[in-house]
Amino acid sequence: MQTIRQVLLTGCALFALSHYAGAAEDTQPHAETSDLSYESYVHSNNRFKCLYGYAAEKTGDHEAAMAIFNDCIERWNDVYSMIWLAQMYEAGVSVPRDLQRSTALMKRGAHVEADSSAEDGAGYATLARYHYGKALFYGIGTNSNKEEAVYWLKRAADEGLPDAVLFLRENSLR
């Protein structure tokens, strides 16, 4: 999980700059909070809100984080939000621990193609492919399927994810 956090943290800035530059004005009135606060984005129609789910989760407002992530997934099929929500279900943060739901979210993210509007250029679909591959490999939240696991892990490795390359090498899969 440390790898997910590292990639997500470093990807936030790239994600914001590459995907949301010049985003349309929000049509929802903001809460009586600073524009820098995640609270002003909970009910926003602006896709930029997806990044604020992280802030909500890290400050302990798990309910707001889940609302933001679920909305971003529903509206935009947002892979960043799928990964964070999957992490919450895997750890049992504010919800009962649910490995099947966590893995299902990673699977959904893994199937997002790089040229779709849901992919942001920051590599979150690649990260989802890696974690879905590991779930398949170990049978976490799904039945173990080594052949399918290797497919997803190789795909993540081919897309440049060092952890996927290392996992394949350490398990003599490449």
Image: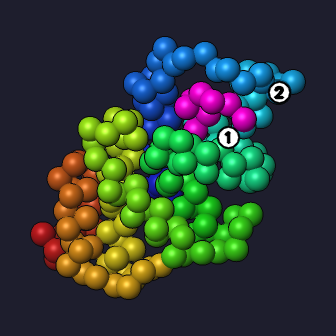
- Residue 154 included in the magenta stretch of the image: no
Dot 1 or dot 2, earlier in sequence: 2
Residue ID for mark 1: 55
Q: Quadrant of the C terminus?
A: bottom left
For residue 48: magenta?
Answer: yes
Q: Which residues are magenta?
A: 43-50
Q: Let me know if residue 118 appears in the view.
A: yes
Q: Is residue 124 above or below residue 134?
A: above
Residue 9 image point, x, y percent: 52, 41
Which residue type does callout 1 highlight?
A: Ala
Q: Residue at x 75, y 29 (%)?
A: 40
The chief SS type of the magenta part is loop
Residue 57 appears in view? no
Tell me the crowding category of disc 1: few under 14, some 14 to 19, or many 20 or more residues within 10 angstroms, Cα based: some
**SS at badge 1:** helix
Residue behind mark 2: 31
**Which percent across, then down, holds residue 73?**
53, 48
